[in-house]
Amino acid sequence: MCGIFGTTLHKGKAAPVIHQALERLEYRGYDSVGLATIHDNKLSIKKDQGSIKDVDSKLNFDELCGKIGVGHTRWATHGIPSFENAHPHMDCKKNVAIVHNGIIGNFIELKSELERKGHIFNSRTDTEVIPHLIEENMMDEDFIEAVRLAARKLEGSYSLAAISTHSPELLICVKKESPLVIGIGKNANFCASDVSAFLPLTKKALFLDEDELAVVKSDKIEVMNFRTGQDIQHDISEITWSTEDASKSGYKHFMIKEIHEQPLAISNALRIQNIYYDLIASKMHKAEQVYVIGCGTSYHACLAASYLFSKLAMLQAKPIVSSEFIEQYGHAINKKSVVLAVSQSGETADTLDALRFAKKMGASIFGITNVMGSSITRLSEVYIGQNSGPEIGVAATKTFTAQLSVLTMLAVILAEKKGSISNNELEIMKKMLLDVPKVMKKTLSTEVKIKKLVKRYKDKSSFCFLGRGINVTTALEARLKLLELSYIPSLAYPAGESKHGFIAVVEEGYPIIFIAPKDGTYDKILGNIMEMKARKASTIGIIQAGDEKLKQLLDDYIEIKDGSMNFLSPLIYIVPLQLFAYWMAVERKCDPDKPRNLAKSVTVE
Ligand code: M6R
């Protein structure tokens, strides 16, 4: 995720307008920033790694002249935060400047094609193919058609804004999957990743649909479908949000916005190039011992991964919380060990400590993280950037399901390498994984029922979550979410363990939440539900849609449509439980974005 902004003014300077808009978009990314304007038919750019404030105090953005320009605040996906990788990006002749949010899935192929034609690249980003593609097209076409043809060649998700010295009055915007909205001002128009960027300037907005291209002048906007070239007419919307509301896309908190962003975050996570998976899978395949380490939610992703590696690839991987890694396995680590670390921030002290130790012992280190350029990316031989964009809420939500998606893909590729599943099974699994965003969208509609459930159970002083198999992970993660957001002391167990102690605390009305998809663990979890009912517990189930037996048995249930996801079930079944924790926090007047005593990144051991 990044923030993009563009403007074309009838008169005045674009740079200060862009600069202030980027400040309102900074929550979308803050590792690098840049602006480009056109003045006297020349493109000028100021950009660098760092926060807007720091880069501006060095470069003074507002000095740039010109009535038209684009700006970008970056959250690195391809290439570390650096001057070269900061946007805007330009073509070889410096006639075109581009800002982009999203991921270009086919950039490797496009880059080699363009390099063969003589284009010189200066960055490691996927974005840089776009200005070069436009430059190539401009040999035969005008600027608008050159952008349209380029957009048709791109795969992946992209919203972009482009300007060119060839048509210095035009701001061209393209939208596919990533957000982009046009702001309609008086003698000035804007484009931005979200309306918060231009709210102090105008309340009138035009929301682009998928595959649309807008040609924006200071007094006119034309929209077309960039695939068919067909003109499109859009209604103009009046925005009633405040700037603060708008940065949360109208949601009350970042956390709920991030929960709803999960289908996109997973699509983006699944766009990672196979080469990284291959490199990690090859090493894991040959290793004598594999450890998967992380803290908090990231540890839960590790635990799920250990089930997946074993079930799909028949590989034993030991999941362990980072802070216990050295004590428990330190003596066993050597150069035949592989340590795969999972950390959203890439800066968690316990995880880094374990990695540094393992590295010293000669182990191969791999990482999965959301923050490019973080310490984990520097410690790892190979790392995967999960592409979730910044997560502002302290509770991990979209980054958890994105981590799980990456780890599932890794398990599938590992299985392919090991030949542990047939080609047919492999294809089915990949297809199911790619369908997760669609299923998740449907699952998010459980929110209405979840809110009612929260009202019913809001005064309970403790909850217990029970799951079996890979959904032990879901139970643990659901407990962590409820605990950290609502401060309700809660428990979570592998359901089979509940008889070995926990059952002693069960009394009439004690709420127990079962994660109960119809997989291989179903009959046993049914038995556990009966045991708890016999003790008069309140039983709540996250169940597969149409499971009449459980619907009869449970006091309350949430049905998951297309819930037969088997090895993918934690990805889907966690969603209503994230919503449960969020709405419980709201109901109990706790701030879900900033739970007490917690920090987003725990950099002390
Ligand atoms: O940045 P990391 O993924 O390494 O962070 C690990 C934990 O601190 C983090 O998951 C924490 O448990 C969250 N508050 C969970 O919502």
Image: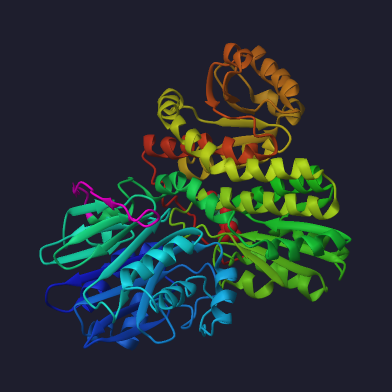
- Assign the N terminus to one quadrant of the image: bottom left
Residue 306 vs residue 453: left or right?
right
Towards the viewer: 36 or 48? 36
Residue at 19% over, 78% down: 67
Left or right position of 188 against 484: left
- What x and y, as percent, mark residue 10? 12, 73
Magenta-highlighted stretch: main secondary structure? Answer: loop
**Quadrant of the rendered image containing residue 542:** top right
Residue 138 in picture, x, y percent from top left: 38, 76
Let me know if residue 288 appears in the view.
yes
Ligand 1: quadrant of the figure: bottom right
- Residue 332 in the image: state x and y as whole percent: 88, 63
Image location (x, y in percent) of residue 419 = 85, 50
Which residues fall within the magenta stretch? 225-242
Q: Is residue 199 visible?
A: no
Judging from the image, the colouring scheme is: rainbow
Viewer-side residue, 512 vs 557: 557
The answer to if 228 sits in the magenta stretch is yes
Residue shown at 55%/28% (left/top)?
A: 560
